[in-house]
Image: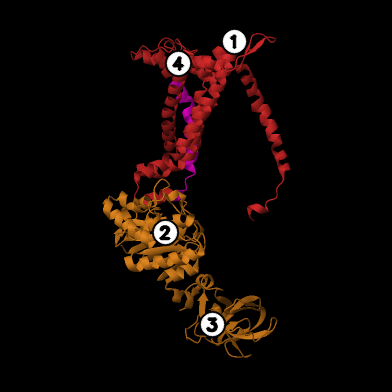
Chain colours: A red, B orange
Amino acid sequence: MNASNKPVNQKAWFLILPVLVCVAFSAILPLMTVVNYSVQDIISPERRVFVGTEWFAAIMRDEELHGALWRQLKFSFAVLALEIPLGILLALSMPAQGWKSSLALVVVSLSLLIPWNVVGTIWQIFGRTDIGLMGAALQGMGIEYSYTGNALHAWLTVLLMDVWHWTPLVALLGYAGLRSIPDAYYQAASIDGASKFDVFRYVQLPKMRGVLMIAVLLRFMDSFMIYTEPFVLTGGGPGNSTTFLSQFLTQKAVGQFDLGPAAAFSLIYFLIILLMCFILYNWMQRVGTQTKEVGHA
Amino acid sequence: MARIELDLAHAYRPNPQTDADYALLPLKMTFEDGGAYALLGPSGCGKTTMLNIMSGLLVPSQGSVRFDGKDVTADTPQQRNIAQVFQFPVIYDTMTVAENLGFPLRNRKVAPDQIKKRVGEIAEMLEMSGQLNQRASGLSADEKQKISLGRGLVRPDVSAVLFDEPLTVIDPHLKWQLRRKLKQIHRELKLTLIYVTHDQVEALTFAQQVVVMTRGRAVQMGPAADLFERPSHTFVGHFIGSPGMNFLPGQVDDSGVHLCGVNVGLPVSGVPLPAGEITLGIRPEYVQIVSPQTPGALPMTVSQIRDVGTHLIVSATISGHAFKVRLQSTAVPFAVGEQVWFRVMGDKTCFYKNEEIVQ
């Protein structure tokens, strides 16, 4: 069989029509309403003015947005920097088989089952200095802890909350990756005289690469869109120290009813996430190969 | 390099009661320093278990492993200084071919220039010199397995190199080439090589001594010729050779051996046979066509004649027992359905009682 033997039938395009229709209704049409808002100033249902890229220009110059975006980037990278290594560590220390492994899996995944707003409420109480275990304990140690009054404390509490909530996801993915490594690899490493660290560096980590990539992308996207937990815990405060992008967007769209700028920013928000995922994905695809080429140049 | 002595048994479950609970039944065995051995047997016969016990990946549930007289039963593979190659290629994805080959040396703190030299030699031997700086993860299964082989051979001072069906994933034409390479390496480096396989051709061509195993038992150890000429267990006769040995049940009394109602007389070799039940074994290669009523012959009905190119394989039956004969000539002196007399009593005929050979 060579390429020229393939029959040409343009009717085959009809086969992808159902998918096109589904995607149109689920993604493209809703997105178009946002695009619609982003290029018009809608004063009332009857009165609308086409403004072109004005909203985009305006929102890009918004100082508050710059603050929120910068805060968001710092937060997402802190989340990745903490949750990925912790998740790997957790996965490595989980028992491999028997009832202990089942128990460990259930215990580790417990926090994943709690709804977002409940997580916020739990930490709100947990951090209170009068009745909360963590807040009272910190107070007892002489630390003037207050997530409602101190911007740094608020930021750290939100971060800690996210780490507590989502590190298990990384651990579960890492655990699945570890279990898929055939015994022969460990046996060969032991025959080759590899140390524990060598086994991690040359066997476990490379074999976990695929699942870790998924973990990084999931955690990045999720943390970049974080809304409910900080909203419940701090409401974005004190000041706007924990106002992340989606909360900023909600304030614009629902609070101030600035639909034009909000729609323009929604599109930019979407493009930022897409771009960051693209960069992360490509970086992780190459991270192993490049170091080798440099090492052997 | 070491002389390996085994005196052990192994069961994967605690408190083994019957023979079936054992992966390896109690055995005593010695592998001489510098020898090339093969462990041959069907899947599940315990050959990989035995190999893993020798390398130290597995601790036997009873008994001991000795290297040069020193008890190493509790030692790790590293302490025993063993190299092992597995059935499926194991490579370190993030390393280059050269780094993969040098990894066992690097872990033992060998000087970098020595590693480079040794890796160069091994790569030369495996014809991989051109690929040394390539990343190992992008190679084909064949090449990956060659790297695994190379990592097994890279240390010149190992006690033994153990191979666990290493050529399963390799293409047939490369198989021959690699097997020849291994023999050459054995001659050059004088390493003790132990090779596990279920392929008799592989075992018989590779090893000086072949250990045939079945159901957790090592039934015979010897050179290829012994296994062929005088299988000490009916399993060996059946497993080695293509087709395997013919077996016919019979009775012994003072007048001779009675097979299927015919008295074929006493053995040519003069071995005294115990009275009672006996099994006669003869290789299809050693059966002769003779004229009717010849002493030591049996009348059989020919059921099939197969021409396999270089010789004929004749299937026949007598009293419900299948019998195979290998004829060198391509001219068939009889047809299917005819009765032919085959001589079964000759100097190559063996006798078995309870599956063991009667000496």
Label 2, label 4: how many angstroms apart (C-alpha)? 65 Å
User: Disc 1 is attached to a residue of which chain?
Assistant: A
Label 1, label 3: how many angstroms apart (C-alpha)? 100 Å
Dot 1, crowdedness within 10 Å: few (<14), some or many (≥20)? few
Residue B227's spot in the image, x, y percent?
46, 74
Residue to which mark 1 is pinned: A257
Query: Can residue A97 be seen from the camera position used here?
Result: no
Tag in front: 3 or 4: 4
| SS at badge 3 | helix
Label 3, label 4: how many angstroms apart (C-alpha)? 94 Å
Residue B327's spot in the image, x, y percent?
58, 82
Residue to which mark 2 is pinned: B51
Q: Earlier in the sequence, mark 1 or mark 4?
A: 4
Q: Disc 2 marks which amino acid?
A: Leu
Looking at the rendered structure, whether the residues under marks 2 and 1 are on a common chain is answered as: no
Whether label 1 touches label 3, CB < 8 Å: no
Please indicate whether residue A83 sits to the left or right of residue A198 in the image.
right
Tag in front: 2 or 1: 1
Residue to which mark 3 is pinned: B286
Whether label 1 touches label 4, CB < 8 Å: no
User: Disc 3 is attached to a residue of which chain?
Assistant: B
Whether label 2 touches label 4, CB < 8 Å: no
Q: Nearer the viewer, residue B131 or B22?
A: B131
Question: Which residues make up the magenta segment?
Answer: A158-184
Q: Disc 3 marks which amino acid?
A: Tyr
Q: Disc 1 marks which amino acid?
A: Phe
Query: Can residue B237 be seen from the camera position used here?
Result: yes
Q: Is residue A80 magenta?
A: no
Dot 3, crowdedness within 10 Å: few (<14), some or many (≥20)? some
